[in-house]
Image: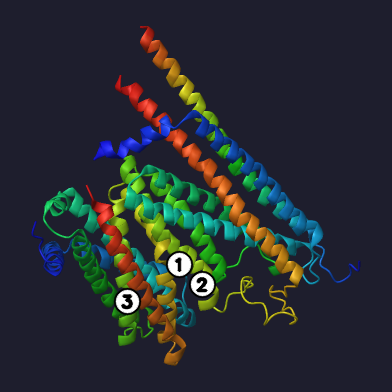
Amino acid sequence: MPTEGIPQNAEYLYLGLVVVFGILGAYAASIFWRFRNLQKDQQLIKQLQEEDSTH
Amino acid sequence: MSAVKEMPVQQTSERSEGDSMLRTRLLQGLTVITMLAVLFGAYVALFVVGTDATQGEVQRIFYFHVSAFAAAFIGFSVGVVGGALYLWKRHEKWDALALAGIEVGFTLSLINLITGMIWARPIWNTWWTWDPRLTSAAIMCLTYAAYLMLRNGIENRELRRRFASIYGILAMSTVIFTLIIIRIRPDTIHPVVIEPQIATQGAATDAEGSFTMSVTISQTLGINSFIWSVFLPLTLIWWRVRLQNAAEHVEQLKAKLLEQ
Amino acid sequence: MNKTPFWRTTWAIMSKDLRAELRSRELVGAMLLFTLLAIMIFSFALELDRLTREEVVSGVLWVTVVFASILGLNRSMAMEREQGNMDAMLLAPIDRSAIFAGKMAGNFIFTLVVGVLLLPLTTVLYNVPVARPMLALVLLLGIWGFSTVGTLLAAMTVQTRARETLLPIVMLPVVLPLLLAAVRASNGIIADAPSEQWQAWPQVLLVIDVIYLVMCLLMFPFVVEE
């Protein structure tokens, strides 16, 4: 494959890929984390309710 | 009035166990399919299609850049549909859908914007230029950031849903503006990608950044845009709606706990 | 229930706002002072010489008008809320969209007064002849659009926690298409370009105005329902 004349800028492509999959991954992770936090909240609420009912 | 509004919520929580399991399985399957599809699109974009002779490797960013915009457009459209349906039906699930669509659209438009900047650095020799297309795309992002801010600024939940729906519909005007600005501001240096390519096919590439599209390039673009604008928004929005439903559920539990 | 006709309601609300303004003069006064300050600050900040002044004057004009209109919108909606007038209007047997039309007409007139006064002011201070009838027409179309979107959004933001801070954030992106068309039209007019070069822009402006007006009239009832 002749490479002369073609600009050598693959590093920008790699940077772009990091951004594309980085942001997608970060968004997926944020949804995951928010789910986790909600589950923790829910458990805490259940715990509190049980404590309430025992008293 | 308020009793009528709360009825469907109870229905959702009483939904049969098997039905909800099926939905979860379906969503999990869809997630796997989406991941594979996106990776397949990336594989075609990175290894199958040839390198652009004038721009070099960096031109491959375009497959993701354009696809991200297409996907963001779907997300924002879901925001409009969800908002309109909420104003009409007053069921909170429509607002959850609108919020999910806009949040996903916002994330994808960020990808669109940043990949555009990374592409511009070697091609235009600058990260950012105040080109009309770039500016309106940035304003589009800011509009949806304002949407999320507006939501945070309202404590009353009914009011929040109503205002968010209205603003989500109004904000679509910036998306349409970004789409048509190439037509009304011909001085933009942004390449026109989605337009009949007959005129440019075989024509000399000009130094500014527009390029000829061979058949394989437009096919790759088509495959990626399809995958991104069908699978990605569907999966992400579905997850986000689930998250919203779970959040509402926890909110209700909290409210009940405080009442005791 | 018999409703007061749309136009009579609109007229009543608008003339109420105008009369209140004629007595207090606080809104237009504040807006005018603001525009005066703004064009002076632009002049200092951009260190304008004669040539650049001609190039940037339409941008300065429009940015000033937008911010002045935001100033007025915030005040006009806050006034309705503070004195409980909004609740009274919502109880009255009138069309909700007529409330919008009335408030919008009031805001439109205030901003237009400021905008029209700004034209001779800029002519004097910037030494660029901007006081022309065609520019006044473009100003009218642009301000019409700002007041339409602005009235709807101000009615929303006035009910939020952040209030005054939120209005520019939610309004500026949405009025951007208007701003672009208005600046383009004004540039052509100020540069004395042949009319076929810029006459598309007032038309674009008119189309956006109509679209926004219909959208806002339809959506305002959802903003104020209670």
> Which of the two discs, 2 and 1, sits closer to the camera?
2
Going 51% across and 72% down the picture, which residue do you hit? B180
Q: Which residue occupies 91% across, 69% down?
A: A2
Query: Label 1 marks which chain's residue?
Result: C
Q: What numbered label is drawn on residue B180?
A: 2
Nearer-the-camera pick, C190 or B105: B105
Give neighbour class at mark 2: few <14, some 14-19, many 20+ (Cα, 10 Å): few
Q: Which residue is mark 1?
A: C45
- Callout 3 and callout 2 share a chain: no
Location of residue B172 in the rendering, given as x and y in whole percent from the top left corner: 44, 61
Colour scheme in use = rainbow
Alpha carbon distance from label 3 to label 2: 21 Å
Residues B257 and B40: in front is B40
Residue at the spot of label 3: C141
Q: Amino acid at mark 1?
A: Ala
Where residue B8 appears, as percent x and y from the top left, is: 36, 38
Outermost top residue:
A55
Dividing the image into 4 quarters, which one contains the N terminus of chain A?
A: bottom right
Of helix, strand and loop, which one carries label 3? helix
Q: Quadrant of the C terminus of chain A?
A: top left
- State the SS at label 1: helix
| Vertical order, C4 against B8 (above or below) | below
Q: Nearer the viewer, residue C39 or B190?
A: B190
Q: Chain of mark 2?
A: B
- Give the quarter of the image for residue B30: top right
- Category of crowding for the residue at label 3, using alpha-carbon neighbours closer than 10 angstroms: few (below 14), some (14–19), many (at least 20): many
Q: CA distance from mark 1 to mark 3?
A: 29 Å
Q: Earlier in the sequence, mark 1 or mark 3?
A: 1
Q: Nearer the viewer, mark 3 or mark 2?
A: 2
